[in-house]
Amino acid sequence: MAVQNQALRVALIGFGEVGRSLGAGLKAGGAELVAYDKGYQTPPFGELIQRRAREEGITLLPSIVEAVAGADMILAMVPGGVAFDVASEALPALKPGQIYADLGTASPPVKEKISQLLEPTGSSFVDVAILGSPAQDGHRVATLVSGKEAARYRDMVTPFGMKVELAGDRPGRAAAIKMFRSILMKGIEGLILEALLAARAWDVTDTVMESVSGTLGKQPFYPDWVSHSVRGGAIHAARRAHEMDMVIETMQDVGVEARMTRATAETLHWAAGLGLREHFGGEIPGSWQEVIEEIAKRTEQEPNA
């Protein structure tokens, strides 16, 4: 396996925190690495990028085409807004057998477009979603991977200690899982900030947090808490929405902007207006899946197969 590691040639497109973290782990495992970053020769971060590359022993090249040429695998770690353009720039140098993995935050449709763009070259596109913090976990950060060659990608990188979970053959599935997970994970961050600011105004922060911890700690978040929340919401959305209206008034009284809370109230008012209480006859439905399917039907949403 060590021979395979040493034979693996990797091009890093983007040499920020993610590129450096993953590159360092691959380099330590014996891979041959080169990198390209559009800002490596310009202020304000050019000097930092060059210093980090020197520290990790990774050669910086002046163009994407030069970096991609000769690589077995390309790891693109660029913002989602430029992911397609970067792939287009790499296109002339791509060849059959190469794996082009996008580890950025591009949306699922953009990742599908990149896959279609690269298909004529004979190279294989892989959608990689990073679920943790590379700055904290390095190249061992948890990832989800989708695409027709996802299993080959996994087999190439796991000898270096990279953690890969397969998410299907369709490019964009890994990105979709990460994005929809972020609705909760990032939403919770926003809610915590807002709750702490509001609680501080009445000097009840510790009591509020201890109470929430006690409630959430009674059962697993998924599926028990999700089931409790969604099933109950089908019947009690209107009452909960009006409660949030009162919360907003209280927050305004102490000068705390209710950004997340206002969005919560709007969502609950919207749910109350769907007529779910009437549909279920005022009885809490048997599963959260029934509620979600009914909402999807009433808003004419179909699963994206």
Image (spheres, rainbow, N blue to C red):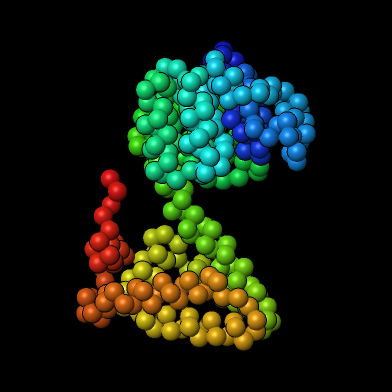
Question: Would residue 185 be found to the left or right of residue 20 on screen?
Answer: left
Residue appearing at x 56%, y 68% in the figure: 191
Q: Quadrant of the C terminus?
A: top left
Image coordinates for residue 136, horizontal then vertical, percent:
65, 43
Q: Is residue 292 visible?
A: yes
Question: Would residue 242 be found to the left or right of residue 46 on screen?
Answer: left
The image quarter containing residue 41 is top right
The image quarter containing residue 66 is top right
Image coordinates for residue 174, horizontal then vertical, percent:
43, 42
The image quarter containing residue 30 is top right
Residue appearing at x 62%, y 18% in the figure: 32
Report the number of discs: 0
Q: Give above or below for 162 relative to 73.
A: below
Q: Quadrant of the N terminus?
A: top right
Q: Nearer the viewer, residue 31 or 258?
A: 258
Image coordinates for residue 264, horizontal then vertical, percent:
46, 72
Q: Is residue 26 visible?
A: no
